[in-house]
Amino acid sequence: MYELLLTKNSTFIIGQVAWVLGKLMEAIFFVLDKIASLWGGTANLGVAIIIFTVIIYLLMLPLTIKQQKFSKLSAIMNPEIQAIQAKYKNNKTPEAMDAMNKETSAVYAKYGVSPTGSCLQLLIQMPILFALYRVIYAIPAYVPMVKYQFYNLVNAMMGMGSTNEVVDAEVFVKSAKLIQDKDLFKSAIAFKKQFKPEYFNIDTISVDKVTQALSGPDSAAAIETTRNTFIDVLNRASSTEWTVISNNFPDLTTLIDNTKFALERYNSFLGINIGYSPADTICTQLGLADNNILNLFKGQADFGHANYLIILVAILIPILAAVTQWIGVKLAPQAQSNDSTNPNDENPMMSSMKMMNTFMPLMSAFFCFTLPAGMGIYWIIGAVVRSIQQVAINKYIDKMDIDKVIEKNMEKYNAKLAKRGVLTQGINNMANTNTKFVNPYSKQSQKTDEQKEKDKKAYEKYVKADNKKKTSGSSIASKANMVKDFNERNNK
């Protein structure tokens, strides 16, 4: 079996998820095409990508809420965690580390979150997001209506006959060498593994090898795989690369024009072809040689024949990608530090996160400038949906009575410890004390069942009274300040 990837992703889990999402994209495109046909039109990939992205993010909303709720609560409790870390900064004994871990766990329990609280959500979301990217990046692989627009041209370039066999091997060799020429097709390097078979690879291809591999009764699988590779390359082709095809196959001019026209109908969105990158669109409009944007600074631009509205839309895509990414970063909960003079010294991770949050919008702009504009649309819509979700979640959490949430979590945690036979002095005390945690039930084996039950009831009564005293008439802010003051006094 040939080690070609076809056009669909075959990565474990991501490939299966991409197949499911591909069916959703196919359904959306089919419905849009039926609606558009009522007015003599056709489906639009830009609209399909927007609908597709919104649906996927809405389906992931429960996971997103859990993850963002965790982030919001983590930002609130971060000063307490840092206070505990500062308390044991100069004490690395096993006893101190054990006490620090217990106090830290108590703080997490107090806020009802886990140190790995968002990991599960991320593990579930990541394959979906990667698969979502794959489907949008390789739409012909998952939407047959788009894929079939390439068929007539690709069959001609492969020298295919009516019997679904290669009957003109010389044409195939010429086409295969053309799409692997890195000077003419810059995207060819992305498909290096798909050119691996000897009959296909530019260094080993020959008429005899093509005839032997693609002209026999058992060649159907190899032909379909090879056809998909041609479609992969043509789907990434820039306007300059389409011109190269036209120049090398003048007898296929009609097929080339028909294919480009059909694809442009699907890809036309706000006046631009979303199959091309914004950089490619700008270069085409300005007549820059080799589609190299750097030639703009060499005085090669033809400003007289440029459509500035199209150029403006092309420029706005990477800019909006960066802006929406930046807004999302600003809306995300930001962890606070106890050290107001140099907050990042005690937490290198916070410094790294701040740097990453600065560069992410810039990276978004770069990627969306060089990738097909359809990817930029997905990037922008995804960021907008996430920002709206974050605003809603922030408002929901801001309206929560955190004191009541903590009180409820404390009761649940203390009850859990009591059930396991562990007597504590309350979660707040445990989180804020400098003394090593001691298990008063360590000698339970020496007591009778009646004595154990009596101790348990006494403990529950004490915890209830202690919690009532600590939660009444106090706010989270005051408690946080008390924790900070207490730790500072004990660290002196």
Image (spheres, helix red, strand yellow):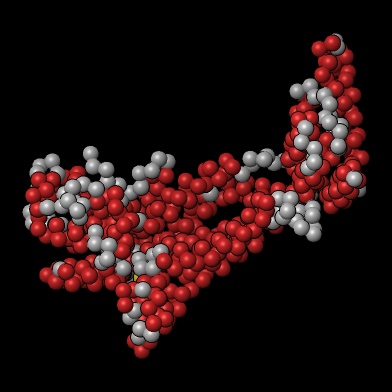
Q: On the image, which quarter does residue 159 sit in?
A: bottom left
Indicate left or right for 370 with 326 as reference: left
Residue 334, position as x, y percentages in the image: 69, 56
The residue shown at (75%, 39%) is 104
Q: Residue furthest bottom?
A: 304
The residue shown at (27%, 46%) is 4
Indicate left or right for 124 with 72 as reference: left
Question: Which of the two residues, 340 or 398, is positioned nearer the viewer here?
Answer: 340
Question: Which of the two residues, 15 or 79, is positioned nearer the viewer here?
Answer: 79
Q: Decide if residue 347 is in sight here.
A: yes
Question: Which of the two residues, 238 or 52, is positioned nearer the viewer here?
Answer: 238
Indicate left or right for 459 with 101 as reference: right
Q: Which quarter shows the C terminus?
A: top right
Q: Decide if residue 281 is in sight here.
A: no
Q: Which quarter shows the N terminus?
A: top left
Residue 83, position as x, y percentages in the image: 80, 46
Residue 384, position as x, y percentages in the image: 55, 63
Indicate left or right for 403 with 51 as reference: right
Residue 38, position as x, y percentages in the image: 32, 67
Q: How many marks?
A: 0
Q: On the image, which quarter does residue 120 sit in?
A: top right
Question: Which of the two residues, 216 or 45, is positioned nearer the viewer here?
Answer: 216
The residue shown at (52%, 53%) is 57
The residue shown at (51%, 63%) is 363
